[in-house]
Image: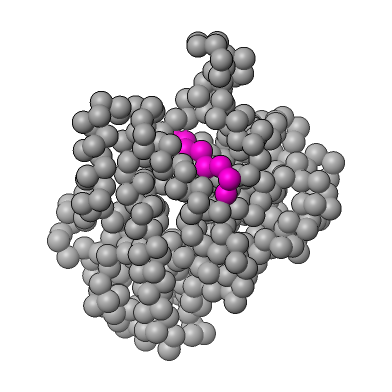
Amino acid sequence: MTHLAKTINSNFIPIAEPWIGKEEEVLVLDALRSGWISSIGRYVGEFEDEFARFASAKHAITVSNGTAALHLALVALEIGPGDEIIIPDLTYIATANAVAYTGATPVLVDVDKDTWTIDPNKIEAKINRRTKAIIPVHLYGHPADMDPIMAISRKHNLFVIEDAAEAHGAIYKNQVVGSIGTIGCFSFFGNKIITTGEGGMLTLNNNTLAEKIRILKNQGVSKTKKYFHPEIGFNYRMTNIQAAIGLAQLRKVQKVIDRKIAIAKLYQKFLSPLVPQVTLHPQAEWARCVFWLYSILIHNKGIKNRDHLMEALKESNIDSRPFFYPIHHQPKYKSKDRLPVSENLSTSGINLPSSPNLTDEKIEYICKKIITFLD
C-alpha cells in the first residue's frame, strides 16, 4: 500500500498502486548481489529484449523516465527551433514539455468526444511547412485512431511519435501500440501498468535511429573512443536495479492487463444504470483498451458535479482524481483557442481507483457511493 494510504487509514482505497511481489524481490536482490547496480548490468539488456517482443518492435531502449523517452525521440528525429509538433490538447503536460525542450512549438488539436484521443479529422487544418511530427497520445489506456493519423503522416511526410505512457499492451486493430508510428514512448512511473519506480522505454524498428538514441541517452559518447563525445547527449540511462523490477513486472503484465479489463467490466456493470447521466470509459470496437485508470464523465452541473463527487468519495476514503487540464489552459501554453471537447472532458472527467489488486467488493463499494451521490 502507498505511503499516502497508510497515512490516512488502512481502509483507504488509492487511485493506483504498484503490484509488487516476490518476483521483483528476487531479481532486485540478484542485481544488488551482482554489484552491478547502475546502468550496466544484465537486466537492462534482458528488459529491453523482452519489452521489444512485448511491443512487437525490433528495438526497445530503456531510459530514465517517460518524458525522457519523448524528448529523446524528438531529438533523434532532429526536431528543433522553428519546428511545429502536433499534439492533443487533452494530455499530461509532459507531452507538451518534451516538445518545448527541443525549442519546437507544440500545436494543439482537439480530441475526439468518443475516444478522448486526438481527433484525426482536425489534424490537417493545423499542418503547415513547419510541421514535422504528430504525437498521438493513447489516453488512459485507449488507443488513438492510428490509421487516419498514419495516412496523414504519409501524405505530409511527417514523423509519428506514439505517446503510449498509459497504454502498455493496448491494441489498435491487431497492432500493439508503440509499434505503429516512427517511435513509441512508454512510462514506467509508479502508477503505470508496468513500473520501475521511475523509468521509460522507446520502441522502434529503424536500426540507424535506434543506434542514435542509444548514443544520445548516454551523454553522446562514442562507441569506439572512451570518454569521447561527438554528440551533445543526455544522462537518460536506466539502472540495472530498475530494469530488474521492470523485467519482473513485464513477466506478469498480461495478468495485470487481464485484471484491469475485468475491473473495467465491473465498473461498467455497476455504473451502466447511470447512463446517460454518466458516460463510461470508451472502448472502440477496433481497440483493446487496457484501462490504465478507469474513467467516467459526470454530466451534472450544480451541487452534483464532478468536483463534488470527488469530495464525497474522499469522505468515504476513496481516492480519485480529475482529468488533465487542457494544455491550452496551462500557463506556459495558454491560448485563446476554443477546443471545446477537451475543455468539456477536463471539467467533467474523473479517474477512479484502478489498481490490479483492487477487489471486486471494493469496486462494488465505490460504485454504490457514486450511485448514492448521483441519485
Q: Quadrant of the N terminus?
A: bottom left
Where is residue 24 shown, x and y percent of the image? 26, 47
Residue 65 in view in this figure: no
Q: What range of the chain is rendered magenta?
A: 57-66
- Could you tell whether 312 is left or right of 62 in the image? left
Quadrant of the rendered image containing residue 360: bottom left
* Relative height, residue 331 to residue 340 (above, below): above
Q: Residue at x 56, y 15 (%)?
A: 224
Q: Does the magenta portion include 60?
A: yes
Quadrant of the rendered image containing residue 371: bottom left
Where is residue 178 shown, x and y percent of the image? 57, 52
Q: Residue at x 38, y 58 (%)?
A: 253
Where is residue 200 shown, x and y percent of the image? 46, 42
Q: Residue at x 30, y 28 (%)?
A: 37
Where is residue 290 shown, x and y percent of the image? 46, 65
Q: Does the magenta portion include 151?
A: no
Q: Quadrant of the C terminus?
A: bottom left
- Could you tell whether 28 is left or right of 143 in the image? left
- Which residue occupies the foreground of this view, 89 or 270? 270
Residue 304 in view in this figure: yes
Quadrant of the rendered image containing residue 173: bottom right
The colour scheme applied to this rendered structure is one colour
- Which residue occupies the foreground of this view, 186 or 119? 186
